[in-house]
Amino acid sequence: MSVTRISNFEARAGMAEKLHAFLKTIVPLVEKMAGCQSCELLRNQQNPSAFVVVEKWNSVEEHRASLKNIPPELLSEAMLLLAGPPTGAYYEPLLAAQFARRA
């Protein structure tokens, strides 16, 4: 069963556009990693400094293993743009088949 990882990012004051540009460069890297089914970047309409990355993975283990493939210098660059550490959690699909049939 697949798993969805939702990660939240808040830009430091005045850094929203730089964080947006940075996250846009990360999405294609994530999509190429083993076990990644999809990766999407979203921006909060009410708070343009807030971003969410929604990733679908084959498993939690494959997502965790992929984190080792992110160059440390990219992580350091991200930390300069963030108001605080990113947060995130794993979600499992519920009733996905029902929603797909209604569409």
Image: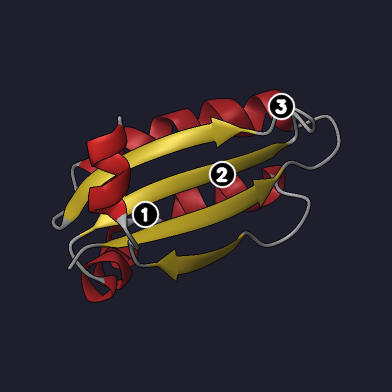
Q: Of the residues shown, which amino acid type is indicated by label 3?
A: Gln
Q: Quadrant of the C terminus?
A: top left
Locate the N terminus and report the quarter of the image it occupies: bottom left
Q: Is residue 54 left or right of residue 47?
A: left
**Pointer 2 residue:** 52
Q: Earlier in the sequence, mark 2 or mark 1?
A: 2
Q: Residue at x 35, y 67 (%)?
A: 92
The amino acid on which the numbered mark 2 sits, given as a three-letter code, is Val
Pointer 1 local density, CA inside 10 Å: few below 14, some 14–19, many at least 20? few
* Pointer 2 local density, CA inside 10 Å: few below 14, some 14–19, many at least 20: some
**Relative to 67, is 46 above or below?**
above
Residue 5: percent from left, percent from top = 41, 59
- The residue labelled by disc 1 is 71
Q: Is residue 30 left or right of residue 25?
A: left
Label 3 Cα neighbours within 10 Å, binned few <14 / some 14-19 / many ≥20: few
Q: Position of residue 54 (x, y in %)?
A: 43, 47
Please identify the quarter of the rendering in which residue 93 is found.
bottom left
Q: Marks 2 and 1, Cα distance to the nearest angstrom?
A: 21 Å
Q: Nearer the viewer, mark 1 or mark 3?
A: 3
Q: Nearer the viewer, residue 3 or 8?
A: 3
Q: Which mark is residue 45?
A: 3
From this view, report whether residue 40 is shown above or below residue 3: above
